[in-house]
């Protein structure tokens, strides 16, 4: 049962890691109309009429969102590595538990990043641009959050199951 839960948690964590990297690196968090042209923006730059430019102003919400997303990626990577390393040396209970905690932390950090981004986008950009919407990178980040939490819960349940099970006895039945 441990291998099933921990393996499922590691696979979910790996999927969350890929989705977190993709959503953090792409420029499609929000789409809007700017001077009659379609525009989109990501965490690192914005694109208008297929020409991309780096964000020139440093605003606290950009920095906070970027920082939390990068920390979420690193935490998810640590959780996946710990989950995989638990299988290489036999089951290491502490590695499975620590990997589960890292994956739950990754989901929490990404949730904080998206909460900040959503709050600022709805209150500021929602009033500034009439025709705007969240884009696919934003939604991928939400799926990554769900997968990271699920992976962490799987690994923590695997740890709980192994600590709750009694050790096998060495006495042969006669």
Image (tube, rainbow, N blue to C red):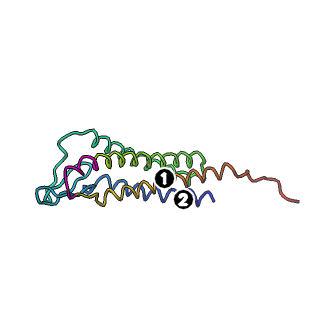
Counting residues from the N terminus, which is met first, the one under dot 1 or under dot 2? 2
Disc 1 versus disc 2: nearer the observer = 1
Marker disc for residue 15:
none
Would you say residue 114 sits in the magenta stretch? Answer: no
Residue 86 % position (x, y)? 55, 51
Closer-to-camera residue (138/84): 138
Quadrant into which the N terminus falls: bottom right
Could you tell me how far apart the alpha carbons at marks 1 and 2 are, in whole angstroms? 15 Å
Q: Residues within 10 Å of mark 1 (few under 14, many from 20)?
A: many
Q: Is residue 174 left or right of residue 134?
A: right
Determine whether 123 is above or below 2 in the image: above
Residue at the spot x=55%, y=53% of the render? 155
Secondary structure under the numbered disc 1 in the rendered image: helix
Quadrant of residue 134 in the image? bottom left
Range drawn in magenta? 121-131
Residue named by callout 2: 7
Residue 132 % position (x, y)? 23, 57
Quadrant into which the C terminus falls: bottom right
- Mostly what secondary structure, the magenta segment? helix
Q: Residues within 10 Å of mark 2 (few under 14, many from 20)?
A: many
Q: Give the residue at the far right of this rendering.
A: 174
Residue named by callout 1: 149
Residue 49 % position (x, y)? 13, 59
Q: Is residue 103 left or right of residue 172?
A: left
């Amino acid at each position: 049962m441990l291998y099933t839960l921990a393996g499922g948690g590691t696979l979910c964590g790996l999927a969350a890691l890929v989705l977190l990297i993709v959503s953090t690196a792409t420029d499609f968090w929000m789409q809007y109309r700017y001077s009659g042209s379609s525009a989109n923006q990501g965490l690192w730059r914005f694109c208008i009429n297929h020409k991309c430019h780096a964000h020139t102003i440093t605003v606290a919400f950009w920095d906070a969102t970027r920082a939390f997303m990068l920390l979420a990626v690193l935490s998810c990577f640590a959780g996946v590595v710990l989950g995989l390393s638990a299988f290489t040396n036999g089951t290491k209970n502490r590695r499975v538990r620590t990997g589960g905690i890292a994956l739950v932390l990754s989901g929490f950090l990404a949730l904080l990043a998206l909460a900040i981004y959503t709050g600022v986008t709805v209150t500021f950009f929602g009033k500034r641009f009439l025709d705007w919407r969240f884009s696919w990178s934003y939604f991928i980040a939400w799926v990554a959050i769900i997968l990271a939490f699920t992976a962490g819960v799987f690994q923590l349940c695997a740890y709980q199951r192994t600590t709750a099970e009694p050790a096998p006895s060495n006495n042969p039945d006669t």
